[in-house]
Image (cartoon, coloured by chain):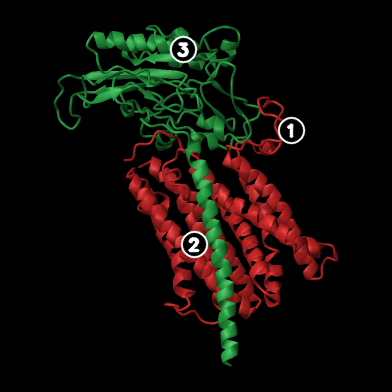
Chain colours: A red, B green
Amino acid sequence: MPTTYVLPPEWEWPITLALFIAGIASGAYAAMGLIHFAGDRSDQPVAHRLAFVPLPLMLVVPLLLIVDLGQPGRFLNLLLRNPAATERPGPLMFNPNSPMNWGSWAMVLFGVFAALAFADALRHSGRLRFAWLEPVSHNVIVLAIGELLALVVSGYSGVLLNVTNQGVWSDTWLMGALFICFSELSGMAVALIVSDRMRATRTSAALRTALFYAAAVSAIVLVVFLGSMAAQQDGSLIALVASVHELVGPVFWIGAVGLALLVPLLALSPRPIVRIPNGSLALVGLLVLVGVLAFRYAIFFSTISFVQG
Amino acid sequence: MSDLRGMFVDTSICTGCKACQVACKQWNEMAPGVPLPMEDEAAVREHRAFTGNSYDNTSHLSATNWRHVKFIEQIGPDPSTNDRSDPRWLMMSDSCKHCAQAGCLEVCPTGALYRTQFGSVDIHQDVCIGCRYCVGACPFGVIAFNQRTGRVNKCILCQDRLEIGMGTACAKACPTSSLTFGAVDDLKAMANERVKALHARGQTDAYIYGWDLGNSGKITAGPNKGAAVQDVEVVGGLNVFYLLLDKPEVYGLPAHAALPQRNFVPSAGVALISAAVLGVTGLAAFRRNRMAENAGTAAD
């Protein structure tokens, strides 16, 4: 049994689900930005359709996070300084040492950019007539700031888990990188589903390569992550990959490794080992999304199995 | 002389009477809790059952147990055999250590956890949102979520008593002076003298956990007999610190407690690098596809 001196924070399903959804939202925004930056005119319809994704999801995420608080009615204390917290300066609440504070602000600000993208998508679909949106929402600086905020939303929760004293979570410096990789995977998967449904063949071809590359990078980061946990020799690796408590081990291998990484690596490679029928790219995207959810689950619940040996 | 106030916990004279536990509960008006039988699975899971561990009745610190007396039975030199020679019974009254660098305070996203004028760490109950980040950040497992109030609780070094010039309730109740309240600098000097006195008497296993005062020795009994020990300073020093007679792990204390923030900058840096790599591979994917398309068109 591992020796542990800490209590688990008891974050469970609502948090797991919130961070999975936030990962899709930020990943989809990142994929939209990539298409804007790297694509040509023929790719833009997919980017515009993809712009519908982040905002609705970013409206759900805070609700899930707030529901999980012990005092949900006080959630504004994350952003506005409560008058009782007299030790903190100014009217706003910002603790630079707290990744949770960084994440709270990033989500609020990212929500603004997600709303801008959503409005622009509405305009492109002919449901909104704000001509002034075009130069704003397609401005390179605006897109770059939005991408940066999407990056923080993708990665802050991983960094947050690193900045604890929990087994598994705080054992390596790679949790933030892993969370960004899996957010990117989920964003690319959504982009692939959208382009496949729109029958945008050229964009789908580019996106399947992008998803393959993202899976390859993620696999490398995951291998380094597992290697660094093995080096700890404190039982944390076992708690993640071999624990049957809450089915953490099987979910990790089948979901995170099998669906999120092996499926795109085998099916989307330039020389695919598994041939997928035409029009089935969306299925690959869906399997990757399920795999990313499994990854979030395994990481979140591994610390409980670590504490309980 | 600084204004820092704290406690020195001398485990060598703790008798395990739990007067400190009772005084803490009484002063802070916490429900006593009735241990339930071990057959009650839910009670075991929620730590409300009899512990089956010596005279320990609360098993660990919690939202309603801000002080916990630990009982460590060392029956013989080797727990795996029936050798019952040289037994000893260690006891320790545990609580929040009011770390000089407090992980819980550092990560609190609302400013609910704060440093008092006495150097202790207190909680604004009106500000806490119950996010439980501090629970996972504390290296000692001290701070705990209170399901009833939806907020976190821990020892607050009797802030209300300190503000009117009194000491802590637990130290006041301790019949053997195992718990001593006072100015941290005075307590450190007292602790150093106590270690030296014990060493002079042949009890060379005494050392300080919380500050490095330069003492070192050798464990004289129990399974770790003969092992070297020395003063341990953790997380910048502890305002509530201990005189121990065995390795920290034996008392359920981490030998190398660390601030969670140690990982912040490296983790964020590695995350940024991975994001940059992903961005480049995404751009490369589009470029590769378009070049392949152009090559195909040219070939046609």
In the rendered view, tell whether residue B184 sits above or below residue A130: above
Element type at marker 3?
Answer: helix
**Label 3, on which residue?**
B185
Residue A46 appears anywhere in the view: yes
In the rendered view, tell whether residue B162 sits above or below residue B64: above
Nearer the viewer's eye, disc 3 or disc 2?
3
In the rendered view, tell whether residue A1 sits above or below residue B157: below
Circle 1: is it few (<14), some (14-19), or many (20+) Cα within 10 Å? few
Nearer the viewer's eye, disc 1 or disc 3?
3
Tag shown at residue B49:
none
Residue type for callout 1:
Pro
**Label 1, on which residue?**
A91
**Label 2, on which residue?**
A291
* Marks 1 and 3 share the same chain: no
1 and 3 marks in contact (CB < 8 Å): no
Residue occupying the point 50% across, 24% down: B100
